[in-house]
Amino acid sequence: MSASVIAQYVMNGAMLGMMYALVAVGFTLFFGVLDIIQFSHGDVVAAGAFAGLAAWTLLTAAGVAAPAVLLLAVVLSAVAVTALLGAVVARFIVLPVKGAPQLNVLLVTLMAGTVLRECLRLFYPGGSQPKLFPALLPTSGWDIGGFHLRFDNVILLVSGALLIAGTHLIITRSRLGLAIRAVAQDEETARTMGIDFRRVVLVTFALGSALAAFAGVIDGLYYNEVFFGMGLLLGVIGFAAAILGGLGNLYGAIVGGFLFAALQTIGAVALPFASAYKDVFAFGVVILLMAIRPTGLIGERASERV
Amino acid sequence: MTTPLLSCRRLTRRFGGVVALDGLDLEVEAASVLGLIGPNGSGKTTFFNVVTGLFPANAGEIRFAGAPITGLRPQAVHRAGIARTFQRSRLCLPLSIFDNLMVGNHQHLDHRLWFNLVRRQVLRRQIEENYRAARELLHIFDPPLADRMMEPAARIPMIDRRRVEVCRALISRPKLLLLDEPSAGMTHEETLRLMDDILEVQQKLGGLTIILIEHEMSVIERVTRRCVVLNYGRKIAEGAYAEVSRDPEVREAYLGLE
Amino acid sequence: MRSRAIAALFTALVTAYAWLLLRAESQGAIAALILVGIAAGILAMRTQLLRPVARSLGSNERFAQGLAFAAVVVIALALRDDDFALLLLTRVLIVIVACLGLNVQFGYAGVVNFAGASFFGVGGYTAAVLASSARLPHLLVLLAGGVTAALAGTVLLLPILRTRGHYAALITIAFALLFRTFLEVNDALGGPQGLKLGEMRIGPLRFNDPISAGPFEGSFYLRYIAVALVLVALAFAVVQRLDRSWVGVALDTVRLDEIAAASFGMDIARWKIAAFTVGNFIIGVAGALSAFMIGFIAPNNYSFAESLIFVSILLLGGIGSAWGLSLATAIVILLPEKFQIIQEYRFLMFAALVVLTLLFRPVGLVPRPLRRLVGPPLS
């Protein structure tokens, strides 16, 4: 295998890893503040990608052609929609069942995700088919020894990294981050310290979902296609990545995302039987990882043996 | 002293950096009642959890009836003859009181799939035998409740749930009973009543050994002849309640008296 | 006796309603019928009109089961030449069987399974492969469908046993997505086009011939209904006997409190394995019969969305409630098929209904009754 092909795989894996990490960070944030898994997270991501697409469609129809304006509109629209959706899910779906059996929380978020997914399929014009996503970034690039390094990919990777770094700063340095960490540590104590629990939960869900909107947009820009079911795939893998890194652990989620992408890429290289099986392989890896390290590779909470 | 029923040597359990049990040595004589006391967080419940196998010990050894049980899973510990109650009630609330008692008797029930599916007549007789036995036991603790065994556990008040929980632990006729604050939420009189009932069953079963975690010192004084005081996972005193309650270290750590 | 008469009257009403709904063709009439049904349902809940019926049926379950059995037979005979109505009826019966299996996992042991349609599909594909290649009697093929589904489930056992709740859910979701994708890319199993099945045969009976016995003539679906009805009866018997036994107590305890269960000697892994395997076996048998009946299977029938429909049925009916899931199956299967306008929106509609159910009435339509191992079954 030539160096350029390897470079291509690495690029591919890095892009996947960035998307997974962005989604996984959301899962881990939600788990941190509420000890629940937001199973509709993946579908919120898909809704973000479609919101971005809608913004592009509307603006181009209105005659706007400047890529920078379009890109900004796509990103803003995606972020706004997902942040709102995240907060709505938290407010009307998750918080009301807080205290109910875990199974109910799981089911209610999963079904809420199905509602979202089906709404995209049924009500987005032509939503039942994969939709073309516009290429808004320059596709030219540098040729490095037979490997074509595209500008758009570099931009996506760098912006993804900046986003994650920004989130990290918010969590560790800001007052909001302090409140989130306090709630994650101990809800009761946080409440007695005067932290508005509901507000922190809503903001966390908005933040985590907005972050995932970028994953949706990156997905769209990278593959030039979005699909109503894409959230299911991103959600399952993002959740698996979050578990891999140890739920509730921000760094773990990032590492887990890239680790999963690496496994997938290596699998695609190492396993000769066609790329047709690449999703089968990815889900197989999810199942296998759960069997080997159910509590994640990093960080493990002490728990009872039963 | 005869050979102890339960003996622990240098038992240690850590949670992260916190040492919940710190080289604890502890022995319980057969057919006795041992009081286990100490301030909150001194490792009493952790001791129960380690003995019953819910948390593995990091170091040390536990012997029960002469055989080592260190590192056994909770199921095996129970089969060896140890039953317990929980500090916070762990009844299955949607199930009937009778079902809950049968949870305690699981090891004596025939739970093979085929038997339960097909041998319905035999099963019916088993159920009826168990019903009578459960009723008899519950009757000691709470006569009116014994006639309400088909009601969901969610419907009875906390005090009755405590009694059901004690019965659930007793029904399998264990050799050792671990009671984790059975009186939480009870009045003084109710607690004494519960203890008298437990002692009555102890007499009947002949040879039941009990370790009792309890905050009510008058209860400890009344039902135990020996008690162990824990602090920071270590044993700081041992002896009759009257002795340990005079011990200056105990008074400082536990009773809050200078 | 009077209460029995009331129960019989109630069953007769429901039977007549089901018959009307199944044979109605104009969308207007169907819409009206559905509205009547919803109104009656709300009225019954508000006025507690059904209390005596529920008490009567609950206190004498054999009688209730007999009534239900008779009702299905009556409807089937009344609609004997209406292929489409009979197809729907068979489908309802088969999905009831599958959901009874799922109920053992979800409702009793608390083992989440979001791949119900996948195991249904394993049964279906097994039937398709065996019916075309092996000379196995078809009743055995049905059994083989169950066995293969149970075996396929063992792949997931290790990860499911090592994890709980959310994690186990993730595993089964991953499996559901994997299974569907696998079927699509695998040429040996027909790829996206799927596989065809020949007609089902039991002894001299050829299932796809129309029935004519003297003056009686009927659709070939009647035979499938007969088999499906037997399966429902068997599955009901198995599931309810499991529930009303020591096994039921153990499964419930494992679901409700693993720590208490372990502390009293219950082997949690054993019970989860038992529930998962028994459940998948039942689902697989149902899937095999379904494949025979439709005569053609494709990956599309076994998508994750279909798995969610199974789960929705359990939750709408009342988790753990065998009668509840039967009622919910009838609603979830019949409504979109008869009322075509909502066909396209069914996933959306039922998902939304489940969200509302979980938020406002988590016990479902027919809440699971308390287990009473001694004494009359219901007060």
Image (cartoon, rainbow, N blue to C red):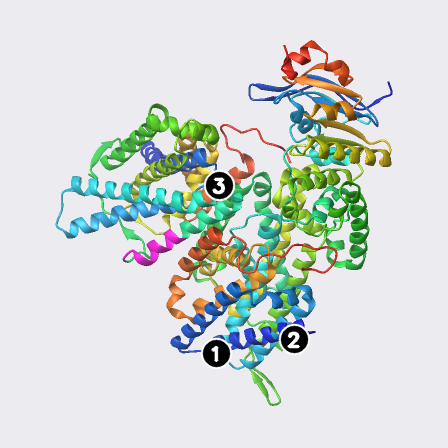
Q: Which mark is residue C5?
A: 2
Query: Relative to B232, is A80 above or below?
Result: below
- The reply to whether residue A7 is visible in this rendering is yes
C288 in the magenta segment = no
Q: Amino acid at mark 1?
A: Arg
- Label 1 residue SS: helix
x and y percentages locating residue A27 in the rendered image: 42, 37
Is there CB contact under 8 Å for labels 1 and 3?
no
* Residue at mark 1: C23
- Label 2 residue SS: helix
Please name whichever residue, B209 or C255, is drawn nearer the observer in this view of the structure: B209
Q: Amino acid at mark 2?
A: Ala
The crowd level at tag 3 (other Cα within 10 Å; few <14, some 14-19, many 20+) is many
Q: Which mark is residue A62?
A: none
Q: Nearer the viewer, mark 3 or mark 2?
A: 2
Q: Which mark is residue A286?
A: 3
Same chain for mark 3 and mark 2? The answer is no
Stretch in magenta: A115-125
Q: Chain of mark 1?
A: C
In 3D space, how far apart are the residues under numbered discs 1 and 2 (Cα atoms)?
27 Å
